[in-house]
Image: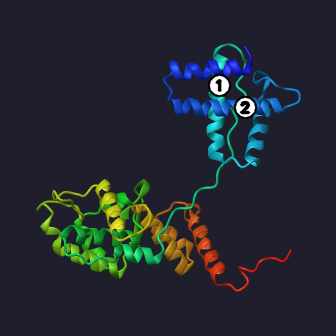
Amino acid sequence: MDAAERVTAYLDELAQQRRRSPHTVSNYRRDLNLLCHLCGELHRVCDPLALDTHHIRRFVSQLHLRGLSGRSLARTLSAWRGFYRWLGLRGEIAANPVESVRPPKSPKALPKVLSPDEASRLLAVGSDDVLEVRDQAMFELFYSSGLRLAELSSLDVDCLPDLVDGEVRVLGKRSKERHVPVGSKAREALIVWANRRGELAKPDEKALFVGRRGERISPRVIQSRLQRRAQAQGVPFGVHPHMLRHSFASHVLQSSGDLRAVQEMLGHASIASTQVYTHLDFQHLAKVYDAAHPRAKAKPHG
C-alpha cells in the first residue's frame, strides 16, 4: 500500500466509521495531500512513513514562510497527527513524528473598539420608554467605567448611592474587589433609572437592573438589547458589552497615557493584559499621522 492508498483508507475510516462530516474529510484530504507533496520535495525521503520530527518541523517552517498563519498550521498539524496515530494503531510506525510539534503562535487580534463618535452615537438616545431608560443607564455605565458584563449584571440596588456619588465597587475575576470612577453622563442616566426602576422591579428585588418580569436582568438580555440599540443607531459592526469595555480602556488611554491607571480600572491582574490597548493607541496615532503629516503620503523616489 503506497502513501496515497493509506491516505484514502484513513479518510474512508473517518467518513464511514467515525462519521466525520464531508467538509472535515475534505479539509483532512487537502492537508494530507500537502504532507505527501512536501514529502515528495525531499531528496532522500519520499515516503511519509519514513518522516521524523525534524522533517515535520521543517515542513511547518516552510509553510509558515509561505504565509500560513499559526491557526492554519495548527489545523494542518492536527490532521497530520491524526493520520500518524492511525498508522501507529495499525503497527506501521513506532512513533508519531507530529506528536511533539506545535505551530508558531499567531499574533493576538487587537480588540475592536468604537470610535468616540460611534460611542456618542450609540448613547445619543432620549427615549422616555422605561426599558430604554434602563438600557441607557447600563450602557452609559459600561462605557463610563469599563465594567465586565457579569460585573454589571450582578450590581445590587444598594450600590446606587455610591454610583450617584461617582464611584462603583465591583467584585471582578478571582473575587478581586476594585473601585472605579463613574462619569457624569452615567450618573445622570442612573438617577433617571433609579426614579423609574419601581415601574419594573418586584418589591423585594435586590438587583439594580431588572428585566420585564421585575427580576435581575440576564447577561444574554443585556447583550441582545445592546445589539438592538447599535442597529437602531446605525453603528456599523456587531457591538457587544466587552466592546464598550475595550472602548473605555482605549479612549481613557488615548486621553491620559496612564497605563497603570487603566490597568487598575479594568481590574487586570497583569499589566500585560492592559498593554494590548497601547497597540490600539499606536494604531490610532498612526492613522492620525498618515492623515495629517505632510510627508506621510510622500512616495519615495525610485
* Residue 156, horizontal then vertical, whole percent: 25, 63
Left or right relative to 126: residue 29: right
Pick the quarter of the image with the N terminus: top right
Residue lying at the far front of the rendered structure: 302
Image x and y of residue 11, in percent:
60, 23
Front-lying residue, 53 or 299: 299
- Residue 186 vs 104, above or below: the answer is below
Mark 1 residue element: helix
Left or right position of 186 against 96: left
The residue sitting at the left extreme is 203
User: In the rendered image of this protein, does residue 8 appear above or below residue 128?
Assistant: above
The amino acid beneath tag 1 is Phe
Q: Three-letter amino acid code at disc 2?
A: Leu
Name the residue carrying label 2. Answer: 35
Whether label 2 touches label 1, CB < 8 Å: yes
Position of residue 91 measured from the top left corner of the image (x, y, whole percent): 68, 13
User: Residue 85 falls in which quadrant of the image?
Assistant: top right
- Residue drawn 12% across and 60% down? 202
User: On residue 83, which mark appears?
Assistant: 1
At x 68%, y 42%, the residue is 103
Q: Position of residue 273 (x, y in %)?
A: 55, 61
